[in-house]
Amino acid sequence: MQQLAVEQESRVEPPKPPVLELRHVSFQGRLENGLRLHDADLLLREGDFAIVQLDSSISTREATSMMQGLQTPLSGEVLFCRNHWHGNDYDRHFGMRSRIGRVFEGQAWVENLNVDENVTLAFRHHGSDTESIRRDVAYWLAKLELHALSRKRPAFVEPSLLQIHQWIRAFVGSPALLLLERPMQFLSSSWLDKLLESIDELRQRGAAVLWFTSEEELVPIGSLQPLIRLKWQEGKLLPADGGSLT
């Protein structure tokens, strides 16, 4: 019995590497309705999927930018793949940010560029191989059953189609972290399965996913497991169902 217990213990897998860590983070952006944090903690590892339920009036844009190293918390520490955003090491931060896919809430496009140029802009800036980008874009277009990227300016494209283009931009490059700000906004429920299938594929590649949503939106309850369900309450990210944050 003792030998069996030792063998079982030896088969226990070590925890997967952390991707996104918030350590006692307090944050307040400029927006009056922005998501504020007070001494908040969060740990997402490779393959984790966390969904945060918020009131529809709460804007997630600034807090998500803080997690991406674009804004600074009042206190605490934000780490991405064990690396912090401190200091002026912009080249390192630039490289870190290239591994984060994001679906933005609100304005998401450079208006004087076509949508297809917008989708590939960041990857070209990061020096990604053009052929690799093309293949990856083609893969996600096929998976989402679209024929091609739109060549129109964002102002002339339907909001629902723009949202799908945001997905593609976020998925390209096999990101280590997906930050999704109400990704089903402007879309019918018929698109939910495609989004969840895509998320599941990226999680299998090692991506961690943080999805912000509101009560009025579709919530993928039971669609993907394991699922970390959180609620924003008094500046903290708390388990919505009594579960753990790790």
Image (tube, rainbow, N blue to C red):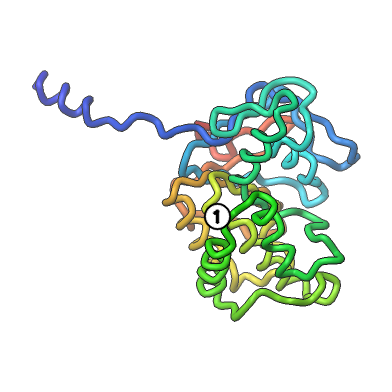
Residue that appears at 27% across and 30% down:
12
Seen as rendered, the residue at the extreme bottom is: 147
Q: Position of residue 168 (x, y in %)?
A: 61, 63
Q: Amino acid under label 1? A: Gly
Q: Quadrant of residue 160?
A: bottom right
Image spot of residue 235 (x, y percent): 74, 30
Q: Measured along the vertical axis of the image, is residue 146 above or below residue 21?
A: below
Spot occupied by residue 63 in the image (x, y as percentages of width and height): 75, 38
- For the point 59% across and 39% down, the residue is 240
Quick one: quadrant of the N terminus? top left
Residue occupying image coordinates x 62% and y 38%: 96
Q: Secondary structure at mark 1?
A: loop
Identified at 49% across, 42% down, the residue is 48
- Neighbour class for label 1 at 10 Å: few (<14), some, many (≥20)? some
In the picture, measured across the screen, residue 152 lies left or right of residue 144, that is right
Looking at the image, which is closer to me, 166 or 3? 166
Badge 1 is on which residue?
Answer: 173
Nearer to me, 172 or 59: 172
Q: State the image coordinates of residue 127 (x, y, percent, origin top left).
A: 63, 51
Q: Nearer the viewer, residue 232 or 141?
A: 141
How many labels sit on residues?
1
Q: Is residue 198 left or right of residue 69?
A: left
Relative to 122, is 10 on the left or the right?
Answer: left
